[in-house]
Amino acid sequence: MIPPRVPFRQRAAQALADPALRVALDRAVDHFTTGRARAMASLPGADALRDHACRVRAHTLSRLDHYLAQFAEAVEAAGGRVHWARDAAEANQIVLDLARSQGVKLVVKSKSMVSEEMGLNHALEAAGVEVVESDLGEYIIQLAGETPSHIIAPAVHKTKEQVGQLLHEKLGIPLTHDPVEMTAAARAALRRVFLSADMGVSGVNFGVAQTGTLCLVTNEGNGRMTTTLPRLHVAVMGIERLVPTLDDLSVMLQLLARSATGQKLSVYTSLLTGPRRRPIDPGQPGEPDGPDELHVVLVDNGRSRILGSRVAEILYCIRCGACLGVCPVYRQIGGHAYGSVYPGPMGSVVTPAMFGIEDWADLPHASSLCAACRDVCPVRIDLPQLLLNLRDEATRAGKSPRWLRWGIRAYRIAATSPTRFRLASRLATWLTRPIARRGWIRRLPPPLSAWTDYRDFPAFAAKTFSQQWRDRR
Amino acid sequence: MSQLHRESVLTAIRASLAKVVLPDARYEPPARPSPPTREVPTDPADLRAAFVAELQALSGQVYSPADHAEAMDILLDVVRGCEAEVAIAWDEAYLPLPGVWEALAAAGVRVLDSTLPPSSDEPAHAARLAELEQATVGVTGALAGLADTGSLALPSGPGRGRLASLLPPVHVALLPVARIVPTMAAFFASHPNVVRRSSNLVFVSGPSRTADIEQTLTLGVHGPRELHVVLLASAL
Ligand code: SF4
C-alpha cells in the first residue's frame, strides 16, 4: 500500500468538512452498533463464547505452520490447487497467470479485503482483464472509481442520493432515491456478468484446516454466484484465516455475523470443499454444477512477520468491522481518511504493522484510546494496547510526530526539577488566566491551538497543587 | 514454484513462532480449547417452534401442512403465485415429497435439466445457463434445519445442484421436521462427513438481502427474493 501524500491530520480535517459524509455516516453507523448490541445480548453466554473464540485464535496461530500445511493438503486432497504467495506482487502474479493460461476475459469478484490489500483489480485490469465487483456496496464504489471505506459496508460513506445519481449516470437508469429500485438495477446488470464471467475471485472468511473447506459468508448471494457459475474459482486468503475444525468454525460463525451486522448468521454461509465433483464411476452422475477448478492463493504479505511482532494479536482479527462503528474517530471521519484499505482501530494496527511503521506512523495516533473497540471485539483483541505498542515502535524508529517529541522534551525540562516545575505551572496559570472562561480554555495560540482547535482545555486551578499542599500543612 | 514459496512461508512462520509473544500462547501452544456448553432445546416441538420463529423473523415463509397432499397444494400455490412457467428442481430421489416433478408438469410448469455440460463445451454450457436463468422457481429438499438461526442446510451432490436454490427469484424448500437440529454444531456432530461428500454445503437463512445503500434492507439482490419452507410431518 502506498501511503497518501497528505498527512493524516489534513485528511481527517477534509473528511470533517464534508457534509455529505457526515449525513451518510450518521444515517448508517448507528444501525451497526445497535444491531450488534442486540444480537450479542440474544446470545446466551456470549462473554464465555468470546473468551473461547479468543483461545481458538491463539491456539491456531501458535501452531499456524502445522494448520496451514494440514489445510493445504486437505484442499488438494479434495481436488483443489494451493498456491503460496510471500507478498502481494506474487499473489497478483499467480492470479494473473491463471487468468492468462485459461484465456480469461471477464472476472467477477465477491468482496475480499485481501484482494483490496493486494491491489488485485488493478493488476488484472492492467493486463487487459475486465473485473467486476459483485457485492452491491463494492459495485457502487467500483462504478464511482473509489475505494471501500468500511470493511463490511464498503459504500457506507455514500448517501442514497449520491448512489442514485451514480447509477443514473453509469447504468442509464432513471434517477431514483429508492434503494429498492437501485438494487434491482444493479441485480440485472450483475446477472449478465455472473452468467458470462470465466473466473470468479472470492475472499475467504475462514479456512478449515481439518477438511480443507473454505467458508464464505454473504447476505446477497454474490459469494455463491461467484463460486458457482464461472468455470474457475480462485479464492484468495490471508494465511492467518484458519480454524482447526468445523466445530471451531461454528463458534466463529456465531460471533462473526452478530458482530458484523447484528445477524445471528449471514443469509448464505457457504462451505466449499474442492471443485465440482466428477462422477466416481464413469456413467454415474457427478455434481450438476459448480466450478471445474478451485484454486486457493495463500497470501502472507507480512503476516508471518507480524506473528513474531508485538502486535501479533491483531492476527486474531476476523474482520467483523465492529470496532469501526464504535470508534469515535471512525464515526467522525469515516474510512477514507485513514488512507488504507483497513480503516478504524483494527486498520490503525494492521496498516502500520503490514506496510511499515515508517510510512504510517500517524495512524496509531488516530485514537483516543477510549477502548470501545476492545469492548466489542468478538475475539477480545486488546486494540488500545496494540496501538500503544505501535506508538512506541514509531518513537523508537524516530517517527513519532514532531509536536509529540517537542512537547515531551519541553515537559522533561520542566518536570525534572522541582523549581522549574513550580515555575512552569505558575507561569501556565498566570498566562492562561485572562483567556479562561468558566473553567475552560477555548482558544490557545499556535502551536497549542492544535489542541484547542478540536477540544477545550480545562483551566488551571487558581493555586497549584504544591501551593495547596503547602497551605494545608 | 508454489512448493518453493510454501517452504519459505512456513519457515517465516516458524521463525516468528520461535519468538512469539501472543498473549495466550506465550510459553507453549495452548491445548485445543473446548467451547462453553450452553442450553439448547432438544424437545422436537421446541425445536420446530424455534426454527419457525427464527425463519419468519428473517422474512422466510413457513408452512406446516397436515399431510403430503396438502404440502403439494402449498407448493403448487407458490408456483402459481409467481406465475412460474419454468422451474429448476432437485432430483425426485432427494425431495422428501413424492411426485413433485409430475405435479409440476401437470400444472404446466417445465422442469429443466439442471446439469451443466462441462465448461470445455462452452456453447452448450452457456446455452444451458441461459436457459436455467429463465426459471422462476427452484424446488429443493434440505438435509437439515438449524433451530437457533432458522437456517436450511443444503448440500450439493449428484441430483442436488446449487443452482436450484440460487438462480430463480423464488426458492421452495421441503424439510421434514424430524431433520431440525438445535445448532450448527449439533448438525456437524450428526453429519460428520458432510463436507467431504459435497463440494458445496450452504446454510441458507432467509431470502437474499442487502443493506449496502444507507442500511436500507432490500430483499432479493443476487439470490432468491422469496424463501418458502414447507415442513413435512414425516420423513422419507
Ligand atoms: S479487531 Fe476485533 S472488532 Fe475489529 S474487525 Fe477485527 S475482530 Fe472485529
Image: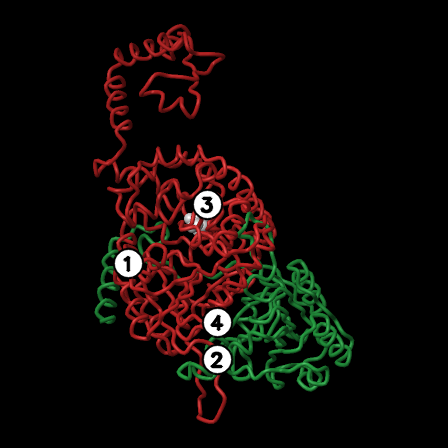
Residue A77 visible somewhere in the drawing = yes
Which of the 4 quarters of the picture holds residue A100?
A: bottom left
Question: Same chain for the residues at labels 3 and 4, yes or no?
Answer: yes
Q: Which mark is residue A195?
A: 4
Q: Position of residue B9 (x, y in %)?
A: 25, 63
Callout 2 environment at 10 Å: few (<14), some (14 to 19), or many (20+)?
Answer: some
Q: CA distance from mark 1 to mark 3?
A: 26 Å
Say which chain is green: B
Q: CA distance from mark 1 to mark 2?
A: 34 Å
**Reading the chain from its start, which is encountered first: label 1 or label 4?**
1
Q: In the rendered structure, the residue with mark 1 lies on which chain? A: A
Q: CA distance from mark 2 to mark 3?
A: 38 Å
Q: In the rendered structure, the residue with mark 2 lies on which chain? A: B
Q: Which residue is mark 2?
A: B197
Pointer 1 and pointer 3: residues touching (CB < 8 Å)?
no
Q: Which residue is mark 1?
A: A88
Residue B32 visible somewhere in the drawing = no
**Reading the chain from its start, which is encountered first: label 3 or label 4?**
4
